[in-house]
Image (cartoon, rainbow, N blue to C red):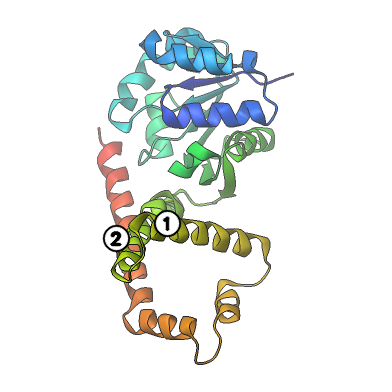
Amino acid sequence: MASRVTFIGAGNMAGAIIGGMIESGFAPDDITATSPSDDILAPLRERLGIQTATDNAAAVAESDVVVLAVKPQIMREVCEKMRDAVQVRRPLIVSVAAGLPAETLEHWLGGDLPLVRCMPNTPALVGAGAAGLYANARVDEAQRRLATELMEAVGLVEWVDDEALLDAVTAVSGSAPAYFFLMFEAMEKAGASLGLPADTARRLAMQTALGAAKMALASDKPPAELKRNVMSPGGTTERAIEHLEQAGLRRIMAEAMTACADRAGEMADELGKR
């Protein structure tokens, strides 16, 4: 039997996942999105042909999977208002909200529920996401496969066995699009200082990053070997890499990612106490 999936929240991430699900074969009639405002729901309903609702509890009562896709700051109120319906139906809960621990979410929903926490990233909006997933002990293998299918609809999925590792996922992929946007910004400026039009430098940098990522994903060679393959002895690439190494790029990245992971842990503590 097809699984009925309800998204609590109809923002950009929910819309991206729903669109990916439909492209990968999920039936629009089996998908519902909820929001207090029909003005928000109408575009999704018209564009994707899904079901929509303004009553969370009523939508949950008919669902096998409930995806929590509202802002962390309002999550407690949203969960508590639909707790009774969740406890009667006992669906798989999938949270894509940053920072909220599984135990906290489960408590707000009444407890004893199968729950998956997901740390996606914004490239999911263009079908090129990367997500880390963690399942509590009540998630069975069928539910784990279903959660994988939901998130693979918009990109790569990797599971972690320890929820605390989602902080590391945040550092490696959740926040990482911004690292690359910073790199593009710096390369554009440097390219312009070397005489290129800024928009030309920007497009060249972005396309090169896309190509490098595709090469790395398609290869069984580690990044260090791929890097060496581009570097001719005494050549231009070797000179640039030597400069980046001497400037401490590895240390800077490690410190930045540690700061990111530390902040993710702090946010989990802060939000979990609400």
| Up-down relation of residue 1 to residue 171 (above or below) | above
Rendered view: 196 above or below 260: below
For the point 35% across and 75% down, the residue is 249
Q: Quadrant of the C terminus?
A: top left
Residue at x 48%, y 7% (from the top left corner): 58
Is disc 2 placed on a helix, strand or loop?
Answer: helix
Q: In the figure, is residue 102 to the left or right of 88?
A: left
Q: Amino acid at mark 1?
A: Ala
The quarter in which the N terminus is drawn is top right
Residue extending farthest to the bottom is 234
Q: Which residue is mark 1?
A: 168
Mark 2, residue position: 259
Rendered position, 220 above or below 140: below
Marking on residue 253: none
Drawn side of residue 149 relative to residue 169, left or right: right
The residue positioned 32% from the left and 56% from the top of the image is: 260
Depth check, front residue: 96 or 14: 14
Give me the residue at 27% from left, 30% from top. Answer: 73
Quick check: can you spot residue 158?
A: yes
In primary-sequence order, the first of circles 1 and 2 is: 1
Q: Is residue 171 visible?
A: no
| Distance of label 1 from label 2 (alpha carbons) | 10 Å
Residue count near mark 2 (Cα–Cα under 10 Å), binned few <14, some 14–19, many ≥20: few
- Residue 84, how many percent across, how many down? 44, 13
